[in-house]
Image (cartoon, rainbow, N blue to C red):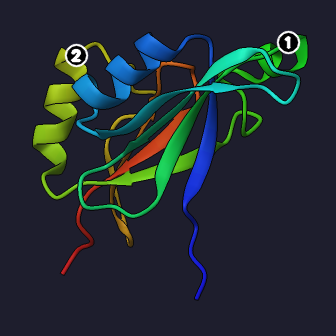
Amino acid sequence: MAFLELVTIIVDAYDPAIAFFVDVLGFDLIEDSPSTTNDGRPKRWVVVRPPGATTGILLARADGSRQSAAVGDQMAGRVGFFLRVDDFELRITQMKAAGVHFASEPRDEAYGKVAVFLDIAGNRWDLLGPKPD
């Protein structure tokens, strides 16, 4: 058996990223533990995950100029993350009220309703609604 356990999003700071994913997107904070870098400097192991999901996101604070340059551009401007929700209209309303920037208006596609939004780091996500009947 194999499964995808985590993906990483590089962020500028842990706490604002946790607040965005937990308070704005409604994810669960799975872990926030002290850790160290490979060369012994302190860092945190921070994992968030949508409720009921098995794959989580490791929120990794940028370490050095190369990683700082990747914050918000991990997918070179493409959508790289996809969040499917049951109530598309309600979720968009909640996210807009929380200040989330949407880069596109909602549209209908064969795979469901979709709108592109930016996370706290500036990465592009598809918010996906239910697939049409």
Image quadrant in which you'd find residue 25: top left
Residue positioned 16% across, 58% down in the render: 86
Image quarter of the C terminus: bottom left
The residue where tag 2 is placed is 98
**Residue type indicated by callout 2:** Ala
For label 1, the residue is 64
Disc 2 secondary structure class: loop
Q: Earlier in the sequence, mark 2 or mark 1?
A: 1
| Quadrant location of the N terminus in the rendered image | bottom right
* Left or right: residue 41 compared with residue 101: right
With respect to residue 81, does 65 lie above or below?
above
How many numbered circles does the render carry? 2
Residue 52: quadrant of the picture: bottom left
- The residue lying toward the viewer, choosing from 28 and 37, is 37
Q: Residues within 10 Å of mark 1 (few under 14, many from 20)?
A: few
Mark 2 neighbour density, 10 Å: few (under 14) some (14–19) many (20 or more): few
Q: Position of residue 127 (x, y in %)?
A: 36, 46
> Which element carries disc 1, helix, strand or loop?
loop
**Numbered tag placed on residue 15 in the rendering:** none
In-front residue for pair 125/66: 66
Q: Residue 111 location, x and y as percent?
A: 38, 70
The residue depicted at 23 percent of the width and 24 percent of the height is 23
Give yes or no for contact between labels 2 and 1 (Cβ–Cβ under 8 Å): no
Vertical arrangement, residue 11 with respect to residue 133, above or below: above
**From mark 2 to mark 1, how far is it between C-alphas?**
30 Å
Of discs 2 and 1, which sits in the foreground?
A: 1
Type of the residue with mark 1: Gly
